[in-house]
Image: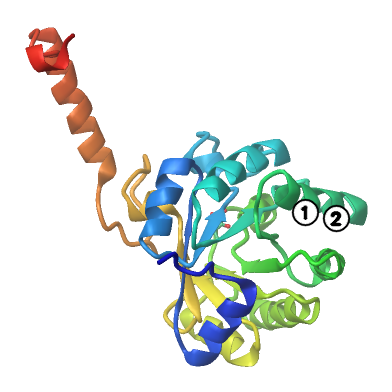
Amino acid sequence: MKEARVTVPALARMQRAGNKIVMLTAYDFPFAHMLDRAGIDILLVGDSLGTCVQGHPTTLPVTLDEMIYHCRMVARAARRSLVVGDMPFGSYQTGLDDALANACRLLKEGGAHAVKLEGGERVAERIAAIVRMDIPVMGHIGLTPQSVHRMGGYRVQGRDARSRERLLQDARAVQAAGAFALVLEGIPAELASEITRAMRIPTIGIGAGLGCDGQVLVMHDLLGLGLEPPPRFAREYVNLSEIVTRAAQMYAEDVRQQKFPAEHESY
Ligand code: KIV
């Protein structure tokens, strides 16, 4: 029997029942298919594709058209998972009208079910306006990669009293604006737990400890597909990079020694 789609109300029910929400990034059809089949609740087409897939040093160069292209592939594969499309840098910061039009494009052209955008109080008005168009919004505060230059690098946030208070305020503002969930990235575990206790909406942590209502990882970190060792907060469950390199080496050896193709692989 076909399993029911994970929906925004279903996520709220999972939170109330104390069932952890499982989220991973996905960027293309075959991987999205495997992750959907594995029972991942939310597939985030993250702008992390800028670093993981496109080879940029940051997420800043990713365009909305590129996000839509990747969203489409993921949406085509996702039978059960909720698909969230990330709003890339420059697609909502430039004005309310841009934010509304671009959120629409992620659903209309990309096939996403919801959008995610980075920031707290300062983007709350954008979140509220997108939600008023009936587009579910996921918030994202803490270490927000689109603010890499302001932060002076990818640094854990919320370490001092002022920054902690700011993050609590940001979380409240995102919730008040109508977001259905909130990603907490790169903040101390006890602060993430405090924010989670203060929220009605589910929190989804990355580098934010166990106390969140769910967890998200970048797929490339989980599968060992990155060029760099995974960050401390990530867990590499398999090293596909080594497996793929080895397979390609075996193929190259077979071609060079004329062991491929064999007779049964020829016509
Ligand atoms: O772009 C992304 O992959 C993200 C996750 C790290 C939450 O925003």
Query: Which residue carries the number 1 mark?
Result: 103
CA–CA distance between discs 2 and 1?
Answer: 5 Å
Residue 40, percent from left and from top: 43, 64
Q: Is residue 239 above or below residue 2?
A: above
Q: Secondary structure at mark 1?
A: helix
Residue 149 position, x and y percent, is 67, 50
Label total for image: 2
Disc 1 packing (10 Å; few <14; some 14–19; many ≥20): many
Residue at the disc numbered 2: 100
Q: Return the residue nearer the eye: 108 or 56.
A: 108
Cβ–Cβ under 8 Å for marks 2 and 1: yes
The amino acid beneath tag 1 is: Ala
Ligand 1 within 8 Å of disc 1? The answer is no
Residue at left 60%, top 85%? 195
Image quarter hosting the C terminus: top left
Residue 136 vertical placement versus 222 (above, below): below
Q: Residue at x 72, y 41 (%)?
A: 64
Q: Nearer the viewer, residue 11 or 173?
A: 11
* 168 lies left or right of 185: right
Which of the 4 image quarters holds residue 103? bottom right
Identify the image's colour scheme: rainbow, by chain, secondary structure or one colour.
rainbow
Q: Position of residue 61 (x, y in %)?
A: 66, 37
Camera-nearest residue between 267 and 181: 267
Q: Residue at position x 18%, y 32% from top?
A: 246
Disc 2 marks which amino acid?
Leu
Instruction: Using the image, determine if residue 94 lies above or below residue 249.
Output: below
* Residue 48 makes an appearance in the image: no
